[in-house]
Amino acid sequence: MRLAALSPSSIIFGEGFEESDFKQWLLRGLDVLVSIGLLVASLPVMLLTALAIILEEGWRAPVLFRQRRVGRYGKPFNVLKFRSMRVDAERDGPSGPHRMTRVTLGSGVSSGRSALTSCRS
């Protein structure tokens, strides 16, 4: 087929952009399998992080921090994150390194150093 014979509408409305139900189901299944695999692969790191927070702050302190975010169409949702600051971090105001745990300070990520800066020093 010659390029001059193509029209924009034949490209836009052609069957090449349609996906069958089977293909959508297959892609969704692949997404779920890859997500489960990544979750299993990262589980040891998450367990070590939780253990480090427990050793630093004690058994009574929460390991996870719940934060409210705004998503698509303004719909709010909750994000669970590992707690990187002390439980009473904002008691004396919103800034300062006294808010962070030793787990966070040891990583160099939240202490103001980027990964690139860490490599150069």
Image (tube, helix red, strand yellow):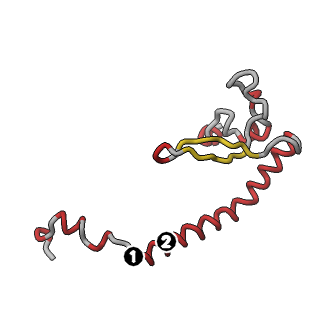
Report the amino acid beneath label 2: Leu
* Residue 52 as seen in the image, left or right of residue 68: right
Judged from this view, the residue extending furthest toward the left is 4
Residue 10 sits in quarter: bottom left
Nearer the camera: disc 1 or disc 2:
1
Disc 2 is placed on an element classified as helix
Q: Which mark is residue 118?
A: none
Residue 19 sits in quarter: bottom left
Q: Residue 96, relative to residue 117: is it above or below?
A: above
Q: CA distance from mark 1 to mark 2?
A: 11 Å
* Residue 14 as seen in the image, left or right of residue 46: left
Q: How many marks?
A: 2
| Residue plotted at (58% across, 42% down) | 69
Q: Position of residue 116 (x, y in %)?
A: 59, 41
The mark that comes first in sequence, 1 or 2, is 1
Q: Position of residue 102 (x, y in %)?
A: 80, 37
Characterize the local packing of mark 2: few (<14), some (14-19) or many (20 or more) Cα atoms within 10 angstroms: few
Quarter of the picture holding the N terminus: bottom left
Report the amino acid beneath label 1: Ser
Residue 84 sits in quarter: top right
Quarter of the picture holding the C terminus: top right
Q: Which mark is residue 27?
A: 2
Q: Nearer the viewer, residue 75 or 64?
A: 75
* Residue with the mark numbered 1: 20
Q: Nearer the viewer, residue 76 or 14?
A: 76
| Residue plotted at (24% across, 67% down) | 13
Labelled pair 1, 2 in contact (Cβ < 8 Å): no
Q: Nearer the viewer, residue 19 or 98?
A: 19
* Residue 5 as seen in the image, left or right of residue 41: left
Q: Position of residue 110 (x, y in %)?
A: 67, 36
Q: Residue 25, relative to residue 89: is it above or below?
A: below
| Residue plotted at (68% across, 46% down) | 81
